[in-house]
Amino acid sequence: MTPQPAAGVRSAGHAGDKCTRPAAGLVDVVVDVRLILPALNNHPIVQRASCAFYPELLQCVVRIFEYRGMLHAKAMLLDEDAVLVGSANLDIRSFRLNFELSTFVRDTGLNGELAALLDRLQAEAAEVAEDVFRRLSLGTRLVNPAAHLLSPLL
């Protein structure tokens, strides 16, 4: 079965909570799920919490790319004609507490332009390999999940 058009997600926040975990479930319906996330975050605890979700997502064949530049706008491509774009992080806390905005648009032209931008960002990013997490130090393997416990507050 050939994967459907890419569902690309870019978030300057972190890579997981109840809202982003369903991305792992999308693999069951044979879609191409890719996350483009910042390689370095301006909040170290957010960086650690984000990385705590990587192994679970990678096991579900979600591809994660770390971009070495600033990412603030959030965007998601759905099929070939739908786009979600805005400044709100794609997590429960942001949806409930932050005063930021996103909009959902059905437009094949906008989808194509955003797909091209995400392709350029992905080309400049480093793909995260699943085996990286097996080589992490014991300290890092303990700190990342501990930071994850703070995810609802980040």
Image: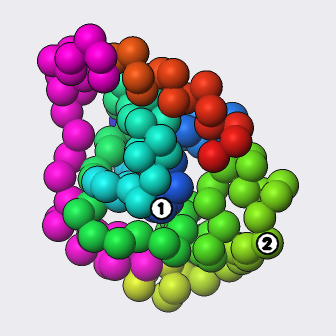
In the rendered image of this protein, does residue 13 appear above or below residue 147?
below
Q: Is residue 88 left or right of residue 148?
A: right
Instruction: Tell me the amino acid under the disc marked 1.
Output: Ala
Quarter location, residue 89: bottom right
Asked whether 97 falls inside the magenta stretch, the response is no
- Residue 51 at least partly seen: yes
Label 1 belongs to which residue? 12
The residue shown at (62%, 36%) is: 151
Q: Which x, y percent locates residue 115?
A: 39, 73
Where are the magenta residues, as a range?
A: 114-140
Q: Is residue 90 left or right of residue 30?
A: right
Label 2 belongs to which residue? 99
Q: Which x, y percent locates residue 127?
A: 20, 46
Location of the N terminus by quadrant is top left
Q: Which x, y percent locates residue 118?
A: 35, 70
In the rendered image of this protein, does residue 143 appear above or below residue 88?
above
The residue shown at (39%, 56%) is: 41
- Residue 53 at least partly seen: no
